[in-house]
Structures are given as C-alpha cells and as structure tokens.
Amino acid sequence: MTLDFDHKTPIYLQVAQMIRDAVLTGDLPEGEPIPSVRQVSVEHGLNPQTVLNAHRILMEEGILEKRRGLGFFVKEGAREALIGTELERFKSEDIPELANRARLLGLSQRSTLDLVRANFKE
C-alpha cells in the first residue's frame, strides 16, 4: 500500500481511501488480514491513532472487521459492497465534477468523451 498524502484531506480519511482502493484492486483480499496498525504507523511515520481512526471508519462501513487478538481483516463481501458505494460516488460526485470542469474549459461533450476514451487505451 503506497501512501502519498495530500494536504487538503485529513490523513485518516486518505488512509481509509487507500485501504478501500486496495480492497477494490484485490491487493487486500477478502478474509485476509491487513497490515497492523503498528506496522503502518511505523512504516509511514503516522500516529497510531490516525491509522486506528481510518480502521474505525472502515469497520463502520462494513469493509473491515476486528478479530480479537489477531488484528483487522477484510470482511467477506467487502469488495462487492465497495464497488456499489464507489460507483454511486463516482456517478454523483466525480462525473458531475468532470462535466463542470469540461464546461469551464469550453470543451464540448464530444471532446470530453474523446479525452475520456483516450485515457482508457493502454
């Protein structure tokens, strides 16, 4: 898990999003443990409470579960749940933001779609 923080968003929210992304990509598989709070905090120079706050949010969302004495694990069904919530966020936040930005730049719908298509090519 690569942690590259921006200065606009609280770090615990960024850590939570990085874990969500790792679950979506399969880097953190369902049923498997995630790196320990101590490991993440030492490795990335974070306060352990910051990492715990991220884990708490993900537990509330049903993405992680805590197993007493074992640590945090990705819950079964977490990826599917994340796909649903992230898709809704993508449609309600990211797409409108992209469309507004394209309009501000004077781009047509066709030009915007061409740019999006170009980014899907490998």
Image: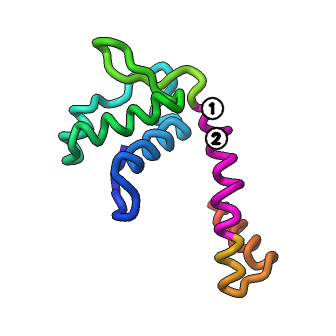
Q: Residue at x 23, y 34 (%)?
A: 39
Q: Is residue 110 left or right of residue 47?
A: right
SS category of the residue bearing label 1? helix
Asked which quadrant contains residue 52, the reply is: top left
Which quadrant of the figure contains the N terminus?
Answer: top left
Q: Name the outermost residue toward the bottom.
A: 106
- Which range of residues does the magenta coloring cover? 79-98
Taking the image as shown, residue 109 lies to the left or right of residue 25, namely right
What's the amino acid at mark 1?
Ala
Q: Could you tell whether 6 is left or right of 113 in the image?
A: left
- Indicate whether residue 104 is drawn in magenta: no
* Kind of residue at disc 2: Thr
Q: Which residue is mark 2?
A: 85
Q: Secondary structure at mark 2?
A: helix
On screen, residue 66 above or below 104? above
Instruction: Please tell me which residue lies in front, 13 or 83.
Output: 13
Residue nearer the viewer, 73 or 49:
49
Q: Which residue is mark 1?
A: 81
Instruction: Say the numbered circle drawn on residue 17.
Output: none
How many angstroms separate mark 2 from mark 1 (CA)? Answer: 6 Å
Residues packed near mark 2 inside 10 Å, few (<14), some (14 to 19) or many (20 plus): few
Q: Is residue 53 above or below residue 121?
A: above
